[in-house]
Image (spheres, rainbow, N blue to C red):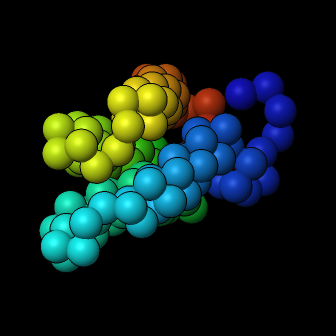
Amino acid sequence: MSEKISSFKELRVYKLAFEVQQEIFEASKRFPAEERYALTDQVRRASRSIGANISEAWQKRRYLAHFVSKLTDADGEQAESQHWLDTAAACNYISEETWRGLLEKCSRIGQMLGTMMAKPEKFCKQSG
């Protein structure tokens, strides 16, 4: 992290997570009505939780363990989003192109989070 970041909104991983949540929201608008309280709700909640957990991690970066814990939660939510996307594709609710594109972005988010978790001290405030 070479540049000074003053807000979680400046993090590339947060920006990508927000992009993914919006793309999933748009794609899920076309799911059948009977999925409204099942798959639609699940995939939207999981995808929205990625960025929410990143924002919480950023605010807790004074405490390395809390920071990593929230990033771990974000990574779990991106994996859950992949599961729901696989389900949507298996039910033919989204195209293969949409499915592949979203999975690639989720995977990239996971890689970015993994890098952050491997070297959290680059992001955490030093106490003192």
Q: Is residue 62 above or below residue 119?
A: below
Whether residue 30 sits left or right of residue 119 in the image: it is left
Q: Quadrant of residue 98?
A: top left
**Residue 27 spot, x, y in % from top left:** 44, 54
Q: Is residue 45 above or below residue 82?
A: below
Q: Quadrant of residue 78?
A: top left
Q: Is residue 20 above or below residue 9?
A: above
Relative depth, front residue between 57 and 33? 33
**Residue 15 spot, x, y in % from top left:** 65, 47
Observer able to see residue 48:
no
Relative depth, front residue between 77 and 1? 77
**Residue at 67% across, 38% down:** 12
**Residue 5 spot, x, y in % from top left:** 77, 45
Relative depth, front residue between 90 and 58? 90
**Residue at 62% across, 30% down:** 122
**Residue 72 spot, x, y in % from top left:** 33, 42
Whether residue 115 sits left or right of residue 8 in the image: it is left
